[in-house]
Amino acid sequence: MADGKNGETTDENELKGATGGEDVVDDAIIEQSAVLLRGYVIQQATIDDPNIHVSHETLGGRPQDEEDPQIKEVVDQLLKIADDLNKNAELQHLISTVQSNCAQDVFMTVARSIFDDGINWGRVVALFHLAYRLIFQALTQNHLEIIKNIISWFLQFMKKHISAWIRQQGGWEGIFRSMTRWRTVSTIAAVAFIVAVVYWRRTR
């Protein structure tokens, strides 16, 4: 199924795991996802608050994780894509209304909604950004015990719904081949709307 918004090809079964009956998920992609999320959090947190000090170890990783040049390149690319998300004040406000101590089902509902009509790199970054905002809240409020839960939810979602698609793109390196496809105002607007609706429903 083609995603008419950005021209990328997606499959209607992608959110159910690998297509064609292939249910084996590449563990390396999930391990890289964890390292990438920690790198994303560290760099974006430093931008948002230069006084905040967070490391891979704080986020459950290893000190050597930050030494991988390939990981650094992918994180930089994620941040470039996220720059558009950061410029969208409405989206930032709406994401901030989802609290870091939200229940797992709230996180999963928002995450699934982001990819409701397909997968592309912009939406993958939106998932990173959602996890980041919740982790950043936990860091600034000194609720460090919540961070482990948020990272776990993020990785569960990645493993179940997104890793097969990333593998089809040739791994995380595929993000460098799709630079012109994720710049869509409609994607950002859709994510903003989704977060608002889900939060409203959950707090009624």
Image (tube, helix red, strand yellow):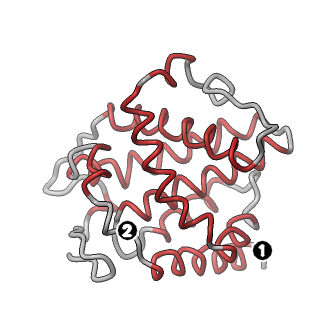
Residue at the image position 68 percent from the left and 66 percent from the top: 95
Extreme left residue here? 20
Q: Nearer the viewer, residue 84 or 149?
A: 84
Residue at the image position 69 percent from the left and 26 percent from the top: 58
Mark 1, secondary structure of its residue: loop
Total number of numbered discs in the rendering:
2
Residue at the image position 72 percent from the left and 79 percent from the top: 200
Amino acid type, label 2: Trp
Q: Is residue 98 above or below residue 177?
A: below
Which residue is labeled 1 in the image? Answer: 203
Which residue is labeled 2 in the image? Answer: 182
Q: How many other residues sit within 10 Å of disc 2, few (<14), some (14-19) or many (≥20)?
A: many
Amino acid type, label 1: Thr
Q: Name the image quarter holding the N terminus.
A: bottom left
Q: Nearer the viewer, residue 71 or 157?
A: 71
Q: Is residue 65 above or below residue 25?
A: above
Q: Which mark is residue 92?
A: none
Q: How many other residues sit within 10 Å of disc 1, few (<14), some (14-19) or many (≥20)?
A: few
Mark 2, secondary structure of its residue: loop
Sequence order check: which comes first, mark 1 or mark 2? 2
Q: Quadrant of residue 83?
A: bottom right
Q: Nearer the viewer, mark 1 or mark 2?
A: 2
Q: Position of residue 128 (x, y in %)?
A: 53, 52
Question: Would residue 105 appear left or right of 190 to someone viewing this image?
Answer: right
Question: Would residue 37 appear left or right of 199 to someone viewing this image?
Answer: left
Q: Position of residue 54 (x, y in %)?
A: 71, 31
Q: Position of residue 45 (x, y in %)?
A: 69, 44
Residue at the image position 48 percent from the left and 55 percent from the top: 80
Q: Give the Cα distance between marks 1 and 2.
A: 31 Å
Q: Are marks 1 and 2 in contact (CB under 8 Å)?
A: no
Q: Quadrant of residue 198?
A: bottom right
Q: Position of residue 101 (x, y in %)?
A: 76, 51
